[in-house]
Image (tube, grey):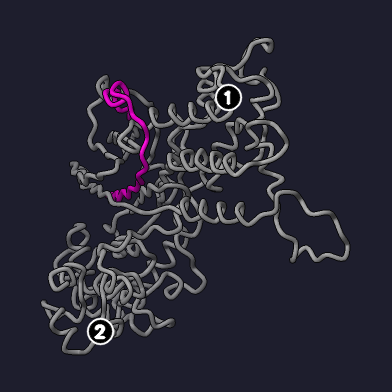
Amino acid sequence: MRIVLMVMVSLLATALDVSAQDKQNLNPTTLLALSEGDQTRLIDLQVTVDKLPYETYWTKTFDAIFDFADSNSDGVLSAEELQLVPSARAVRLSLGSAFTPPVAAIQSLKEIVSDEAQKCTREQLREYYLNHGAGRLQIGSGQLANTAAITAALVRTLDTDGDGKLSQVELNKAETTLRRLDTNDDELIGAGELVPNATYPGRWAARALRHSTEVDLSASGDHSLKLKQLLTHPAENTTEETDWRITISDELTDQPLKVTTNSLCQSWSVPGPQQELFQQLREEINNAADEAPETSTEQSSRNRRSSRAWLKPLADRDLNGTLSQQEIDRWLELQQQIIHGQLLISVYYGGGLFELLDTNHDAGLSIRELRSAWKVLEAAACTSEKHVEQDRVPNVVLFVVSQGYPDSLARTSTSEIEWFQLMDRNRDGDVSRREFTGSPAAFDRLDQDHDSLISPSEAGKNN
């Protein structure tokens, strides 16, 4: 079975005070092994946040948590100060909640230090978090749903002569043939329009990839394709010869993987919802009452104003029983630093024809994608003469890297031009004649290749 491996990458940027020593630190890597039959390909993930190695960023974040809780600045945490420290589980849960929720609170110093008579040091707090899985690069896997049904629907609709094959002629007419399926009239053929009620991707990649534990990525479950996380190590000490190095950083580099098994790896960015969720949290806290409202049977729960009562034990640094605005701001600043480093690599497997043609992975086939269908399949080496060899369509595996759980697998628009973004209502990366709000003459002037689509590059040339 041939494999097409598509890797998506995302990162954000804030500023941290970085020492010269930290800048010289080696960049730890995460090594993945992708095994196909008797061949194993090594993928080296090099991750940085704000130009810091991932582990260095989290060391600084653990130190920020320590400094926040060390209210008397004596360099150790007492049992009372420890109440301000989010548990390791809360830090892990911030991946989805965009803040450390008040769960699994640390009950005593004994959870961190061996001698309860001692106080918690900075190094002991770091060790506690790392031993309980906080600050680790999260990798999850999950199978794409409805792949077989979506492929069958595509073949059934495109096979206009009914011979059971897809020809080049039929694929070149895909834009016209599939247009009747566009029930919401958005110039995209979505997964739900091919298979009623089908969702995409269907489920989150929720199965965690553990060290030395293999995950079966084969669509049929025959163990023909397996993924395993090997170890984390400094790059300079790497003795393994890797087939591909994925650099997840502020400046993403795209290095396709070319191997003898005809696998292809690509990388691009996809956003996560963390910042939007964090802004919602900030607004809720700013609009909340200081104390919980008194219970009243006459007052509707719908009209009750939310309170900051839950936040008090988490942010009351001077332990005086009330929250100052300075304490709230300091807590929010710490939360932003925590969620900023919460990266998730979601490995989706079991994809097929639809995933191969949907090159921006927005769960819809656009006009441009339909027009280039034959070229895409030809480049993937699954065509023979003038027909598609359906048994050679690769098993598509998607690596989606995001900050928090991704809202979508789609790549962001490639254009930063405001009018283009406003007109591209279906977010497919092109502005069609129907979407364009200017005059026909203006559209023709912008559409330099006369394909009835204005691309980002065409918009840029005439901006």
Residue ID for mark 2: 433
Tell me if residue 457 comes above or below residue 293 in the rendering: below
Count all numbered tags in the image, as a single digit.
2
Where is residue 322? Give x, y as percent: 70, 40
Name the front one of labels 1 and 2: 1
Per the model, the C-alpha gap separating discs 1 and 2 is 61 Å
Seen in the picture, residue 207 relative to 377 is either above or below; the reply is above
Q: Is residue 447 left or right of residue 161?
A: left
> Most extreme residue toward the bottom, as rendered?
440
Q: Position of residue 251 (x, y in %)?
A: 25, 44
Mark seen at residue 436: none
Name which residue type carries label 2.
Arg
At label 1, which amino acid type do we have? Answer: Asp
Residue pictured at 13% horizontal, 70% vertical: 461
Q: Quadrant of residue 437?
A: bottom left
Q: Is residue 162 left or right of residue 408?
A: left
Residue 308's x, y, as percent? 68, 48
Bounds of the magenta segment: 2-29
* Secondary structure state at the residue bearing disc 2: loop
- Marks 1 and 2, the one that precedes in the sequence: 1
Q: Residue at x 37, y 66 (%)?
A: 151
Residue at 35% x, 75% y is: 425
Which of these two is toward me, 445 or 419?
419
Q: Residue furthest right?
A: 297
Asked whether the beta carbons under mark 1 and mark 2 sit within 8 Å of each other, the answer is: no
Q: Is residue 17 magenta?
A: yes
Mark 1, residue position: 70
Q: Secondary structure under badge 1?
A: loop
* Quadrant for the C terminus in the image: bottom left
Q: Is residue 51 visible?
A: yes
- Callout 1 crowding tier (Cα within 10 Å): few <14, some 14–19, many ≥20: many
